[in-house]
Amino acid sequence: MSLANLLELRNISKVYTRGLINASSTTALEGFSLTLKEEEPTILTVAGESGSGKTTLAMLLLGFITPTSGQIIYRGKDITTLSGDEKMTFRREVQAVFQDPFAVFNPFYKVDHLLTVPINRFKLARSRAEARDKIEEALTAVGLRPEDIQGRFPHQLSGGQRQRINVARALLLKPRLLIADEPVSMVDASLRANILETLSKLQRDHGVSIIYITHDLTTAFHISKSIVVLYRGAVMEAGDVDTVIKSPQHPYTRLLIDSIPWPNLDQRWGERPIKARETGASSVGCRFHSRCPSAMEICEQRPPLFRLSERQAASCHLYRDNDKLDGERLTEVLPA
Amino acid sequence: MTSIALTLPDLRQPSNPALVLRYFRRNKVLGVGVVVVTLLVAFTLIGFLVVDPQNAYPLSAPTKKPPSLQHLFGTDFFGRDLLTAMVVGMWQTAIIGLLAGGLGTLIGVILGFISAYFGGWIDAVIKGACQILTPIPVLLIQVVVAGSLDKRDVTILTMAYIVVMLAWMGPTLVIRSQVLTMKERQFVSVAKLSGVGDLGIIFGEILPNLLPFIAAAFVGQVFAAVFASFYLAVLGLGPLREPLLGNIIWAAQSQGAFFNGWWWWPMEPAVAMILILASLALVNMGLDELANPRVRRTE
Amino acid sequence: MTELPLAERRPSAPSVVRTPVLRVKSLQVSYYTDAGRATALDDVSFSLNAGEKLGMVGESGSGKSTMALAMMRMIKPPGRIEGGQVFVGDVDLIGLDAEGMRNARLSRIAYIPQGAMNSLNPVMRVGAQMMDAVKAHLPNDSRSAVEERCRRSLASVDLAAGVFRMFPHELSGGMKQRVCIAIGILLNPQVIIADEPTSALDVVTQRQVMETIDNVQRQVGAAVILIGHDMGLMAQFVDKVAVMYAGRLVEVSTVREMFTDPKHPYAKALISSLPNLNNKGVFQGIPGLAPSLLRIPSGCAFHPRCASVMDICRSRRPAVVAQDSGRVVACHLFDARG
């Protein structure tokens, strides 16, 4: 049934509880479902501010934390039930590029360590010479000169170079699924294009599916095909990236788009005023209720996803006249 | 993707010895400490080549002689040649220090790592044990234990064990807290993604970064061990036959050395002990700066 | 597909006084490291009028943060200010002694560093920290006057009165940053320097904070220097843009000129690498790497990466030449003739 699916998230929730007696719980992610097909590698953006659950989703996908409920099925197997060998395969095929170019390097070692360790552990090369070739190939593909990089310590290189090495590592491993968590947000503007292009090539030429996590919708627009907008752990809007960004329907997405500082003098940001976020999330009803300019009485009930078109859905009562879309079928509005 | 021919600056680092010297210039504390320790070690090592260790024991030389050309440091009431005694005594102090210090640090590293990395009940047990044992007055226990041992059982080795008994909790807690922070660092996550297992992460990723801390903890342990052996010996609880520096002082005290005018007898070991402890303390402080880059001074 | 609606133009800025409130002349800063001498700022000059907003952009290592530190005289060894003058009003900050400079900081020129919100003292209430800052400059003011000033400052950044008694950890990132802005304007400085004030903030909070800086600047009438590398922020916020490369100033233009007709090849490449709604899928990075400040290329620092490089660019450093309309460019393509 699901052997053709690279990844299936079935109604994942992650809830953190604190305290024994007066336990308070925070829902980091709620009822999230997604399917990625193996033969259709795609780039999907998961967009949201801090607290939206996007980092939690990344940690869940990488297997660093386990969901409170729901299942994560990778290539037909629940990842919590993998055997030793299968775990290694999972590790090899699901990789990440993180945000902070410096933090991923162990300061004790030279930068080569980042690339040689996975080659050794995953047996990606049969000899030292082959390993060296692969490393040089990956470094050159991201625009670095191997002789400038090899043998150096992380603090001797610039942030841009370090992030390029991170991307080279992803190239080297050629995973099936790559989680890119804000890969360009700590990188200078002039280098962003370079890194995004490499990620794009990974998907196009090497069949890697990428989940691009960000709060920067401009880069998301450039690189991905589909988008899911999260707010406080719930999906606000989802669909084809062009449609959602150029004509957002959910009030939260509209607020986000409105606040984008476009590098274009004729696109001024912010006519919509911003209502400050309150410290207590509205746990009843729509998550965005307390900040929404179009809030109505019915918003005290959690809105389901309403399908707005073939490639767009929003969970907002403004659209309650449309067909409902079951959370588990979210993938249907996401183009491949 | 074309890569433009721009070479990175040729960061020709000065040679390693030059770098070390430059660091000592900045971190004078460490520099001075290391120099003094080296001199003391040299004193002992060269001393062994020069003197006959037997002379450190009673009845090997004329008694109560002040410093002279034959006996550079003089002799004591029992006929020990004090120069030889100092050489042998410092050597024995070093053994106690290194043994107890090494053992304490080793226990600290093992327990600290296990506790922090695996967490859960193991962590609770180890942490709890440390926290319960720490407030125990170490001096009292050491005195009681040493005092209740049969005089013949008190040797250099037993001194070392008595010292380690209550010294391992400090390093354990310090290393545990360091590992706890390191565990959350992103390069550990990346190592996991690269297929590295738990042992590989402990030894390959975390341990190398903690070497400065472990070195600092080690020096601290050595200091504590040397100091403990000293005061136990001064109280007369040490292996009385051996020429431990503390023993010499105790003996001098019990014979009323100052009143009798044999000033060299207690003064020499006292000065030696001050030098040893001070230099170890300086090295400890200096290593602290090395281990904690935020404390590092800029040029 | 509907287009994004064109927002209304901002109301025109109040007429600015023509005497520059900030004049930087030939500022020169070097760092002496184990590996050699790095020229962090090389003969940088520019000026700003009261009420004007200048955006300073460049890659990391281009010297923009060093510029801010140099103006505040906060360069620590092994860095050294080797020459130049920084006039705020009539006073040359470089020539002041230590005490004079201490007085000048916050009262004449205020600096909101990168990550300022993380440098708030976690064990002191916000109000107490602000009052400390004021008391250091106005020791003779009464306590109630000082408190009143602090509260007014908090109000002008749109924070509720209760924030005065809160601890930093009780505030969100955006609120903390606004506290830092409030501290910056306590003594009505003539120049405010904000170094990447929104880099750690979400896009919505970012907008809030920038709008706050805008409001505050209008109230106080200060000149603002916004340091950053987000060209989008610059487009939305500043009046003029200065582009730095390898410690040198390569272009200063009005914001409209910079986005529609940049002159310097580096500025041009920066602008074309920006993603916008009309060039989806097109990635135009700048090839090559920014040079290390230890080994700046001969002649024009940008020549190894420049698409329009000429022979002269390799040997002679281009002078900063004023174009008509107040723009300055340092490029041989625009050398003054004759």
Image (cartoon, rainbow, N blue to C red):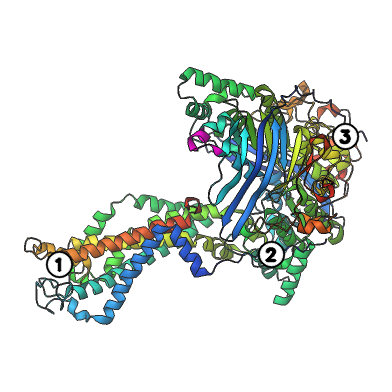
- Residue A196 locus on image (x, y percent): 80, 52
Q: Amino acid at mark 1?
A: Trp
Spatial CA span between label 3 and label 1: 94 Å
Q: Residue extending furthest right? A: C1
Using a 10 Å C-alpha cutoff, classify the residue at mark 1 as few (fewer than 14 neighbours), some (14 to 19) or many (20 or more).
many
Queried whether the magenta region covers residue A130, the answer comes back as no
Q: Amino acid at mark 3?
A: Ser
Question: Mark 2 near mark 1, Cβ–Cβ under 8 Å?
Answer: no
Spatial CA span between label 2 and label 3: 44 Å
Subunit bearing disc 1: B
User: Circle 1 sits in a helix, a strand or a loop, which is it?
Assistant: helix
User: Circle 3 sits in a helix, a strand or a loop, which is it?
Assistant: loop
Spatial CA span between label 2 and label 1: 63 Å
Rendered image: mark on residue B15: none
Using a 10 Å C-alpha cutoff, classify the residue at mark 2 as few (fewer than 14 neighbours), some (14 to 19) or many (20 or more).
many
Badge 2 and badge 1 in a common chain = no
Disc 3: which residue: A247
The N terminus of chain C appears in which quarter of the rendering?
Answer: top right
Q: What's the magenta region?
A: C95-102
User: Circle 2 sits in a helix, a strand or a loop, which is it?
Assistant: helix
Disc 1: which residue: B265
